[in-house]
């Protein structure tokens, strides 16, 4: 285990201004916090954060990152709290430690192989600061190095697979090649130990047979370049066992068929030397077609720059050659970590698939010094998305602002249609709650539930919105159907005919309807009047036609009760609806909104919905309640919150009853352990009546809040 002074000396070797006192404090704090905890290896737990800090120091990271490495498991695994960290080490360290802790909490929730891409995005989205990700990678690397100590086969394999699926690609994407190679090899060793062993054995056999082939090829290439007038450093290695295995898998070939298992690297001083070296090599050895790639002029998305080529090289060996400058090499090996050390100009990056990386590199480019770089590198990636878990650990990506209702519809339409509540991280919360990255969401469903029009106001996904709208449309059709049938029945009765559907069937074509039901819907929507239908079904002598049949009676939506149209200013025959958003009551100022083919909808003058019609004054209809209107039968809607205690519901209904209100509908819209949210529809005479009831409810001690529903 690295000693305190060794760590401090290592940091000071590349950052002489490092805050030594803070490093010392963090070292001691972590040691005390982890106390006598042990690792699976039997080592003191504290050795782990120290090794992680050491890895970060090898990457030459700033003091804050090293301290975060030392403290990264204290909040999750010891009695230390984030407040303690904040107080002792300041808000920056606290934020970084919090970030790493959150990443640790989402780990190993399930087998995420199938959702690796989403999970990588989640990790990136939660690593708001690049340093959080770097600490997490170092943490993972040390855990992988000590993986064999874990006793459970299952757990080892799960960690290895997660490393392969999540952390190897992440390390590669941010250009940390050295780390990527090691993570990959360690995971390979756990997942396919036999394949790895056999590839290593065969590589060993080749080495033996060819003598020191790699060294001889290095010597010859170095000399060839020298003769061409170029001083270059040449190195060579066998390809990694995993990359050989991948190639055998991908191309479905045996080890013997594998052409090149050796790769050589030529390091030169500048970019033009790269091309000169390429020219010398291409003229000295036969080129393997299709292997040349120029990542110097067109860097990879992770900013990797190098020339790649394949030749039949010295001793007729097929080899791969990579040519790059020493600076390019540093970046290739250390990735983003190299950037704030060398501060060189970064090439243009084609980040079509890696928008986040381009943004990261733009930040890197704009930072004028290492400190500023770290300060401003808040990775603003996937800010438009949020990733949440199902109870089984499946990961679901949703747009930012998504709610449990969006989640429910994303899981299954049925789940969406019947959801009544949601547990977020085990707590029952309102359906309109906005989900956060990493939340675990469990939807509570009830067969009795149907989509609520109010959901439409907070859902953000197209799927949820479309389903809710479709449901409302279907429901509306049913309402229009009932309304239309009642209007037609009444019109026929008023003209002295018995109601029967047979005469209606004869006139369907006249109204462009396929079925009698369609005809009712058309009447309900106001496309045809009841009188028109009655007249068509039973043609009248002329004198009777002039007899005015006032269509002054309409059926109120949903109540199923006939009543006089209480509104002045309407166009006769026009279908009338009371808006479900604001539930207008007599005595209130109202306004009508005309929808062609649908009739007029009455809103209260202060209804939020009206804003959407502001640009269409031609649709506004000046209406008022008839002065003689005194009947009951208007529905006022209120939302009540009451404490979830026995008898409270009784107090609610009793209070309403005492004030002469008749409850027509009562629905619990949200139920938690502490409170109920209840929507109550009350039949009242007018707005004053409802105000009296609200006042009475507010005076009742067990009732927390009462609001008139306003849309
Ligand atoms: Mn750890």
Image: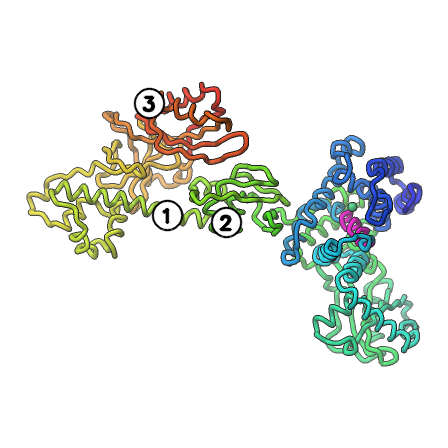
Q: Residue at x 86, y 50 (%)?
A: 58
What residue span does the magenta drawing correspond to? 134-145
Q: Can you say which quadrant of the picture contains the C terminus?
A: top left
What distance separates the C-alpha of mark 2 from that of mark 1? 18 Å
Is 377 placed left or right of 709 in the picture?
right
- Front residue (pair 2, 38): 38
Residue labelled 1 has its Cβ within 8 Å of some atom of ligand 1: no
Nearer to us: label 2 or label 1:
2
Residue 255: x and y in percent read: 78, 75
* Count of all numbered marks drawn on residues in the image: 3
| Spot occupied by residue 546 in the image (x, y as percentages of width and height) | 10, 42
The residue to which callout 3 is attached is 660
Give SS at disc 2: helix
Q: How is the protein colored in the picture?
A: rainbow
Depth order, front residue of 400/85: 85
Which residue position is annotated with label 1?
473
């Amino acid at each position: 285990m690295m000693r305190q002074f060794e760590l401090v000396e290592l940091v000071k070797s590349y950052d002489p201004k490092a805050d030594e006192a803070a490093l010392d404090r963090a070292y001691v704090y972590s040691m005390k916090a982890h106390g006598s905890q042990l690792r699976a290896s039997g080592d003191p737990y504290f050795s782990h954060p120290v090794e992680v800090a050491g890895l970060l120091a090898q990457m030459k990271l700033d003091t804050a990152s090293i301290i975060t490495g030392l403290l990264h498991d204290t909040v999750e695994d010891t009695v230390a709290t984030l407040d303690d960290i904040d107080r002792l080490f300041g808000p920056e360290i606290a934020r970084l430690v919090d970030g790493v802790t959150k990443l640790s909490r989402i780990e190993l929730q399930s087998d995420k192989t199938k959702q690796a891409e989403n999970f990588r995005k989640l990790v990136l989205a939660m690593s708001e600061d690049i340093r959080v990700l770097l600490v997490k990678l170092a943490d993972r690397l040390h855990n992988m190095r000590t993986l064999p100590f874990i006793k459970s086969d299952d757990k080892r394999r799960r960690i290895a697979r997660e490393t392969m699926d999540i952390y190897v690609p992440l390390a590669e994407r941010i250009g940390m090649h050295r780390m990527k190679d090691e993570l990959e090899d360690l995971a390979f060793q756990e997942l396919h130990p036999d394949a790895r062993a056999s590839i290593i054995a065969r590589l060993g056999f080749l080495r033996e047979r060819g003598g020191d082939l790699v060294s001889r090829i290095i010597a010859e290439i170095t000399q060839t370049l020298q003769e061409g007038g170029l001083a270059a450093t040449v190195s060579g290695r066998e390809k990694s066992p995993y990359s050989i295995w991948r190639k055998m898998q991908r191309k479905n070939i045996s080890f013997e068929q594998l052409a090149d298992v050796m790769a050589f690297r030529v390091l030169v001083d500048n970019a033009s030397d790269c091309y000169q070296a390429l020219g010398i090599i291409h003229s000295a050895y036969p080129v393997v077609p299709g292997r040349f790639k120029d990542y110097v002029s067109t860097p990879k998305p992770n900013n990797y720059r190098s020339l790649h080529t394949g030749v039949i090289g010295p001793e007729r060996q097929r080899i791969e050659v990579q040519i790059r400058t020493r600076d390019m090499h540093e970046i290739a090996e250390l990735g983003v970590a190299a950037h704030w050390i060398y501060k060189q100009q970064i090439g243009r990056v084609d980040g079509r698939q890696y928008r986040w990386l381009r943004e990261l590199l733009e930040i890197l480019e704009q930072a004028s010094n290492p400190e500023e770089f770290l300060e401003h590198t808040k990775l603003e990636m996937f800010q438009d998305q949020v990733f949440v878990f199902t109870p089984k650990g499946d990961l679901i990506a949703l747009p930012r602002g998504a709610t449990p209702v969006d989640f429910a519809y994303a899981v299954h339409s049925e789940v969406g249609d019947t959801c009544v509540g949601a547990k977020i991280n085990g707590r029952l919360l309102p359906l309109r709650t906005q989900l956060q990255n990493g939340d675990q969401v469990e939807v509570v469903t009830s067969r009795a539930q149907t989509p609520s029009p109010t959901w439409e106001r907070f859902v953000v996904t197209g799927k949820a919105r479309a389903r809710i709208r479709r449901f409302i449309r279907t429901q509306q059709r049913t309402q229009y159907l009932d309304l239309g049938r009642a209007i037609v029945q009444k019109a026929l009765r008023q003209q002295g005919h018995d109601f029967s559907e047979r005469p209606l069937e004869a006139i369907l074509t006249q109204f462009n309807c396929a079925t009698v039901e369609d005809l009712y819907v058309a009447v309900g929507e106001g496309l045809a009047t009841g009188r028109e239908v009655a007249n068509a079904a039973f043609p009248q002598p002329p004198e009777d036609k002039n007899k005015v049949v006032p269509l002054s009676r309409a059926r109120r939506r949903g109540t199923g009760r006939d009543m006089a149209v209480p509104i002045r200013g309407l166009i006769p025959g026009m279908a009338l609806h009371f808006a479900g958003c604001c539930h207008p009551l007599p005595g209130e100022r109202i306004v009508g909104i005309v929808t062609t083919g649908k009739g007029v909808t009455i809103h209260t003058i202060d209804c939020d919905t009206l804003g959407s019609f502001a640009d269409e004054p031609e649709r506004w209809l000046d209406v008022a309640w008839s002065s003689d209107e005194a009947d009951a039968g208007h529905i006022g809607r209120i939302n009540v919150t009451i404490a979830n205690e026995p008898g409270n519901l009784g107090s609610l209904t009793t209070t309403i009853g005492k004030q002469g209100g008749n409850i027509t509908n009562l629905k619990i819209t949200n139920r938690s352990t502490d409170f109920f949210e209840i929507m109550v529809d009350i039949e009242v005479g007018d707005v004053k009546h409802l105000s009296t009831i609200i006042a009475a409810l507010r005076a009742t001690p067990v009732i927390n809040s009462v609001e008139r529903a306003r849309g």
